[in-house]
């Protein structure tokens, strides 16, 4: 193999770690993953919930990474993709059996990928403060003309490729595109139902091993089981981005103030007691997840503006989660990018070209594919989001599912 490209992967989430794994498997070992977390143990509130992996994207990505058997036999919850949709009076509108889209907790997926990458390739405690162009170096020097400044006071440079897999608030993105995520107007507030909770049996009845969604009156309430058998509760609201500012005090008092607010007529006050019990008894501290997104037309940029730089996942095509395909799309990003790097930077393809020439061909190929998929993801999510927050959201979602099935 000719001189390998030196690659910096910013962010140790699913897309960044999967890219590292695929590069490693194919002999491209001159890479480093820079992750802001201090260690592989996530901090409080960072674990996330659960997600389903789709056959043509997330599952295929794990097969390509040689990890599908471990996932399938030990981590996949094949019976957990069932969905129960009700209206605000707890009347069943949709009951969908488990599909071929097994669930896995986000923290488990991350650990599966982490364990597949050599430990020396991960730089923990390296949150990026900025990526800066070195003055006096021409653009043809590609990513080597950039210095990565870390929040811990260190810096590094000399990479042929810098991949921003650093999520919604990417530090790499501003060098590639002026696009910034906007607040969607929607927010999830998360609580929990442990196994010893008084409403645990109600959660089992409503959600089972999967997910219950109560939709209507411009809001929703979701109950979802995770791997340890407990449940996450998500109150999906249309509120201002600074919603939290109206509540004061410590985490406990803020949780109780929010709970009191949710009892009111503007939120869940008129909902069925079967659903309001989750407002009353879901355990805190409640955590707020404002939802951000791009407009579809913002996904895309001119390749010549940013030689040696690209984006993966939410950094490239941030969307709200309503399509249920965000991580799957991000993992497909990693597969497509890895394939392009292998194709254009391997021993049979470089020839007389430079490493930067091969990288630019790989990025042009990857981005042409990624732009289309990212735009489609945002459109799908926006369609489902708009339906889910209608006054009769549950039945409108049923109609949407029926139209989608007819068009399949």
Image (tube, helix red, strand yellow):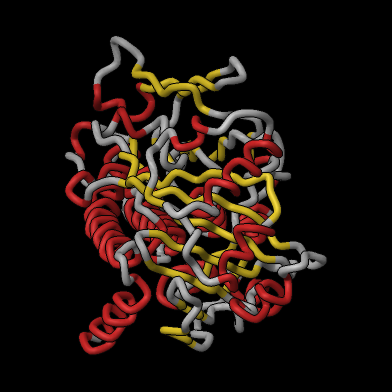
Which residue is more in the foreground, 149 or 255? 255
What residue is at 31 percent from the left and 66 percent from the top? 391
Question: Is 176 displayed left or right of 240 in the figure?
Answer: left
Tell me if I can see residue 214 in this picture: yes
- Write down the quadrant of residue 57 in the picture: bottom left
Tell me if I can see residue 116 in this picture: no
Which residue is more in the foreground, 299 or 27? 299
Question: Is 406 displayed left or right of 81 in the figure?
Answer: left
Question: Which quadrant, please, contains the C terminus?
Answer: bottom left
Which residue is more in the foreground, 192 or 327? 192
Q: Say how many tags the image has.
A: 0
Residue 129: x percent and y percent?
Answer: 49, 22
Residue 74: x percent and y percent?
Answer: 71, 75
Above or below, comparing residue 79 to residue 251 in the picture: below
What residue is at 50 percent from the left and 84 percent from the top? 100
What residue is at 32 percent from the left and 49 percent from the top? 317
Which residue is more in the foreground, 149 or 380? 380
Residue 296: x percent and y percent?
Answer: 21, 52
Above or below, comparing residue 269 to residue 73 in the picture: above
Which residue lies most toward the right here? 196
- Write down the quadrant of residue 2 in the picture: top left
- Write down the quadrant of residue 369 in the picture: bottom left
Which residue lies most toward the top here? 136
What residue is at 31 percent from the left and 39 percent from the top? 182
Residue 78: x percent and y percent?
Answer: 60, 82
């Amino acid at each position: 193999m000719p001189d390998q490209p030196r690659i910096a992967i910013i962010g140790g989430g699913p897309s960044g770690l999967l890219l590292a794994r695929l590069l490693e498997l194919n002999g491209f070992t001159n890479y480093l993953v820079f992750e802001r977390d201090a260690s592989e143990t996530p901090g409080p509130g960072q674990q996330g919930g659960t997600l389903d992996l789709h056959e043509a994207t997330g599952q295929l990505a794990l097969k390509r990474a040689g990890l599908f058997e471990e996932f399938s036999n030990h981590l996949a919850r094949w019976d957990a993709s069932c969905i129960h949709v009700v209206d605000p009076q707890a009347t069943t509108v949709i009951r969908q059996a488990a599909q071929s889209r097994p669930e896995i907790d986000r923290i488990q997926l991350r650990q599966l990928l982490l364990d597949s990458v050599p430990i020396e390739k991960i730089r923990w405690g390296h949150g990026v403060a900025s990526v800066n162009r070195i003055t006096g170096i021409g653009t043809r020097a590609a990513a080597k003309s950039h210095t990565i400044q870390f929040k811990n006071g260190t810096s590094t440079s000399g990479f042929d490729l810098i991949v921003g897999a650093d999520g919604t608030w990417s530090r790499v993105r501003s060098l590639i595109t002026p696009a910034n995520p906007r607040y969607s107007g929607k927010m999830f507030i998360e609580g929990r139902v442990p196994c010893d909770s008084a409403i645990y049996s109600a959660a089992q009845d409503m959600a089972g091993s999967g997910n219950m969604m109560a939709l209507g009156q411009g809001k929703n309430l979701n109950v979802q089981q995770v791997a340890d058998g407990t449940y996450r509760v998500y109150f999906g609201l249309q509120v201002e981005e600074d919603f939290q500012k109206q509540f004061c005090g410590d985490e406990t008092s803020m949780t109780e103030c929010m709970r009191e607010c949710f009892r009111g007529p503007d939120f869940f006050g008129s909902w069925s007691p079967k659903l309001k019990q989750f407002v009353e008894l879901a355990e805190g501290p409640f955590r707020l997840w404002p939802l951000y997104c791009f407009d579809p037309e913002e996904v895309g940029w001119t390749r010549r503006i940013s030689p040696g730089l690209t984006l993966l996942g939410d950094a490239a095509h941030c969307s709200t989660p309503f399509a249920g395909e965000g991580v799957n799309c991000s993992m497909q990003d990693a597969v497509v990018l890895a394939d392009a790097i292998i194709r254009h930077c391997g021993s049979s393809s470089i020839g007389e070209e430079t490493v930067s020439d091969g990288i630019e061909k790989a990025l042009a190929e990857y981005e042409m594919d990624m732009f289309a998929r990212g735009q489609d993801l945002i459109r799908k999510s926006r369609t489902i989001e708009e339906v889910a927050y209608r006054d009769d959201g549950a039945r409108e979602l049923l109609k949407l599912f029926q139209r989608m099935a007819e068009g399949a």
